Amino acid sequence: MKLKSLEISGFKSFSDFTKIEFLPGLTGIVGPNGSGKSNISEAIRWVLGEQSAKSLRGSKMPEVIFAGSADRKPLNRAQVKITFDNTDHYLNSDFETITVTRKLFRSGESEYLINDQTVRLKDILELFMDSGMGQDSFSIISQGRVESIFNSKPEERRSIIEEVAGVFKYKKHKEKAERELQDTNEYLDRINDILRELN
Ligand code: ATP
């Protein structure tokens, strides 16, 4: 899986449509303070389903929409589209190119798309879960995160290792199966009670 491009419009400082192509090799983004470098990595996290406005340095999600500048009016919609080369089928999908789009309108409405088809947020999270690009993954490390990893509690560090090792998805499946098993046992108890009453 390779990151091919990122298209941003109306997200944070990117009022105009901006396309960044990631060519083979290393890509460095340079610019003066406040020019929007961190906003690019935040756009990647956002399009992949980030739900915490705080971790995007805001207090409410609509704050990611371009808020206007001295010579530009605020916009009503933020949109980010990310494209991956999936010819190695690293992501569990038959598609060789995968695009994920997220839109947020000032009204609070949002849209998620995979290859231009409307999907649920859950579908995006599942597609990237355990890929190393999922939520809370370590492929994007923001300023200050390194320290927080070193200072985290052993249990928190364990979940970091589980995510990196790719067992997080199975843990989630196990939790779901355990819940279903518990529900089934409760139904069985109820049936046994009814049977006892009938006898
Ligand atoms: P540094 O080198 O200091 O870390 P940077 O290049 O990473 O800076 P960012 O932090 O990505 O810069 O960008 C900050 C800029 O983005 C600020 O000028 C801020 O006003 C602008 N900005 C953030 N959110 C919005 C928004 N919703 N609308 C318009 N501009 C925004």
Image (cartoon, rainbow, N blue to C red):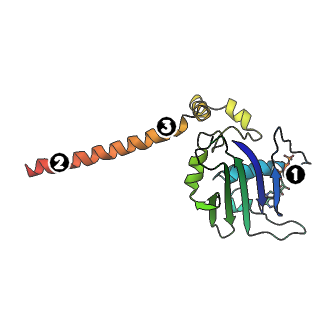
Q: Is residue 141 above or below residue 151?
A: below
* 116 relative position to 66: left or right: left
Q: Is mark 1 within 8 Å of ligand 1?
A: yes
- Asked if residue 56 can be seen in this view, the reply is no
- Sequence-wise, the earlier of marks 3 and 2 is 3
Task: Locate residue 191, reporting x and y percent.
Answer: 20, 49
| 13 or 127: nearer the viewer | 127
The tag on residue 193 is 2
The crowd level at tag 1 (other Cα within 10 Å; few <14, some 14-19, many 20+) is few
Label 3 SS: helix
Cα gap from disc 3 to disc 1, whole angstroms: 40 Å
Where disc 1 sits, the SS reads loop
Q: Are marks 1 and 2 in contact (CB under 8 Å)?
A: no
Identify the residue under disc 3: 171
Per the rendering, the mark at residue 34 is 1
10 Å crowding of disc 2: few (<14), some (14-19), many (20+)? few
Within the image, what quadrant is residue 160 found in?
A: top right
> What is the secondary structure assignment of the residue under circle 2?
helix
- Residue 3, percent from left and from top: 74, 45
What residue lies at 69% left-to-right and 29% top-to-bottom? 150
Q: Amino acid at mark 1?
A: Gly
| Closer to us: 92 or 100 | 92
